[in-house]
């Protein structure tokens, strides 16, 4: 099994930056993709970005393209989400999630970290 722990959330003013971290442990060799998702209060969970564990291919939601960057450090089993030019609408709980190499869905989730962007 894989375990994920997020950190790095906090309060930031609009236009500011934050870097979220996700520490993976356990059977990390079984990871195919790592994704970042977010859920704002009263809304559903939405996709933010993803990266393949082996090749580093990335994908982003339109709403964050050009502002957020996902990266990974396989040696340290860490995944990062660099968030720049933050907007109040980026306020949410951010989760990292893992999907196995042959899985269709993200089925392993961290506990989440709160990001609040003030206007």
Image (spheres, grey):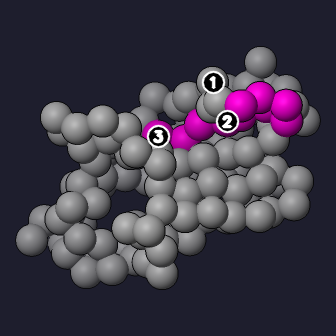
State the image coordinates of residue 52 (x, y, percent, origin top left): 77, 53
Question: Residue placed at 71% from the left, 31% from the top?
Answer: 104
Q: Quadrant of the C terminus?
A: bottom left
Mark 3 and mark 1 lie on one chain; the one further toward the N terminus is: 3
Q: In this view, does 85 lie to the left or right of 58?
A: left
Badge 2: how crowded within 10 Å, few (<14), some, or many (20+)? many
Q: Do we see residue 97 in this rendering? A: yes
Magenta-highlighted residues? 95-104
Query: Nearest the camera: 55 or 25?
Result: 55
On the question of residue 113 being in view, the answer is: no
At horizontal 24% and vertical 55% (from top left) the residue drawn is 91
**Contact check, label 2 and label 1, Cβ < 8 Å:** yes
| CA distance separating discs 3 and 2 | 10 Å
Which secondary structure, mark 1? loop
Which is more foreground, mark 3 or mark 1? 1
Q: Is mark 3 on a helix, strand or loop?
A: strand
The spot of residue 9 in percent (x, y) is: 37, 52
Q: Is residue 71 above or below residue 7?
A: below
- Earlier along the polypeptide chain: callout 2 or callout 1? 2
Does residue 106 appear left or right of residue 90 in this picture? right
Is residue 17 found left or right of 34 in the rendered image?
left
User: Seen from this angle, which residue lies furthest left?
Assistant: 119
Residue 87 among those drawn in magenta: no
Mark 3 highlights which residue? Answer: 95
Find residue 26 and report its horizontal and vertical position in percent: 80, 26
From the image, tell me which residue sits under label 2.
98
What secondary structure prevails in the magenta region?
Answer: strand
Secondary structure of the residue carrying numbered label 2: strand
- Disc ID at residue 107: 1
- Mark 3 surroundings: few (<14), some (14-19) or many (≥20) residues within 10 A: many
- Residue 12 placement: quadrant: bottom left
């Amino acid at each position: 099994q894989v375990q994920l722990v997020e950190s790095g959330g906090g309060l930031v003013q609009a236009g500011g930056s934050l870097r979220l971290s996700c520490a993976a442990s356990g059977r990390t060799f079984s990871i195919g993709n790592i994704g970042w998702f977010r859920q704002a209060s009263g809304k559903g969970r939405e996709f933010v970005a993803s990266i393949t564990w082996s090749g580093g291919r990335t994908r982003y939601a339109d709403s964050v393209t050009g502002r957020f960057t996902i990266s990974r450090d396989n040696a340290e089993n860490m995944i990062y989400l660099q968030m720049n030019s933050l907007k109040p609408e980026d306020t949410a709980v951010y989760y990292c999630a893992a999907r196995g190499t042959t899985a269709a869905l993200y089925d392993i989730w961290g506990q989440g970290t709160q990001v609040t962007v003030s206007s």
